[in-house]
Image (cartoon, rainbow, N blue to C red):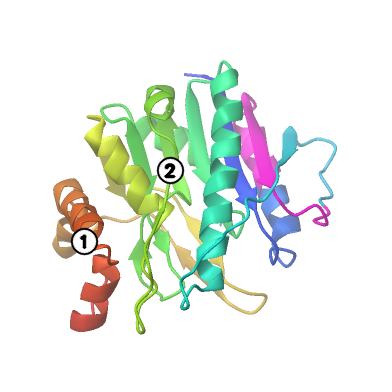
Amino acid sequence: MNEKILIGTTLVSGYDYIIDEFLKNQRAIQKKYPNSELIISTSDNNFKLNIPNELKCKVIKYQKSSVISFDSLFIPQKNRIRDMVDGRNVVRDYFLKSDAKYFLSVDADMVYDPNIISILMNEIKNSDIVMSGYMKKNHRLGYSLGCALIRREVLEKVRFNCLIFPSSPDMPNIIEDGWMFEYDAIQNGFKIKRGVFVEVEHIISERERLGIIPREITTWEKIKTNSALRYLLVKLCILTKRDMPRIIIKKIGCEL
């Protein structure tokens, strides 16, 4: 199979330490899968990208939405997440104007096995979305839009989104884009597959990197990543206007 695939990411300030390595890795991916193209969105007009000549890449700049909040505990993290959601939707809109059948969502602070496309194409056969896990900054396995292959039919019905509620003194109430994307996809009847299929290196800073290699996930990891459970948790967040997964993690000391 040699379907056309668009690879999309959004860039915000602070990625200077990784961007050259990220672009080099994307070039390696394109060599393995020539029928792919990288799309980068950014709202940072001062961000300079040295795109290698041999890399098929389009950069789309967009206007950052202004955030007006009367929440005295509003935190910068909320602005960053909202900006990233806007950037993901810029790339989504570009994708839907193309003739590509699949969208590969990646994060610009990660590098991937150059065979990522063929690996995930093999895994998505009986699903609509396949997410490969990676190590988060808290040194735990996580799933999100940092490594997700998505069929066109999904993005025709689902936009990227996040929910931001008034903060509490001890908890910024944000349902992030990865959780909301899963929730909206399930609501539309799409099937999600999760596992650790791809070698991914998460570059946390110039000094710290967290890597993961393909492996079988444990029974406990399967329980935590069950689609029905995650769907119900987001539903609970919407009803309570609180980030319930984060609150549960804080209370019982484990990761969902």
Label 1: few (<14), some (14–19) or many (≥20) C-alpha neighbours in 10 Å: some
Residue 49, position as x, y percentages in the image: 81, 51
Of 142 and 83, nearer the camera is 83
What residue is disc 1 on?
Answer: 221
Residue 244, position as x, y percentages in the image: 24, 67
What residue is disc 2 on?
Answer: 148
Instruction: Tell me which residue sits at (66%, 49%) in the image.
Output: 25
Residue 40, position as x, y percentages in the image: 67, 42
Residue 28's disc number: none
Residue 17 visible from this viewpoint:
yes
Of 171 and 120, nearer the camera is 171
- On whether residue 40 falls in the magenta region, the answer is yes
Q: Would you place residue 214 above or below residue 63 in this image?
A: below
- Considering every residue shown, the one lying at the far front of the view is 70
Which stretch is magenta?
26-48
Instruction: Tell me which residue sits at (47%, 33%) in the image.
Output: 118
Q: Would you place residue 182 above or below residue 153 in this image?
A: below
Image quadrant in which you'd find residue 37: top right
Q: Secondary structure at mark 1?
A: helix
**How far apart are the alpha carbons under marks 1 and 2?**
18 Å
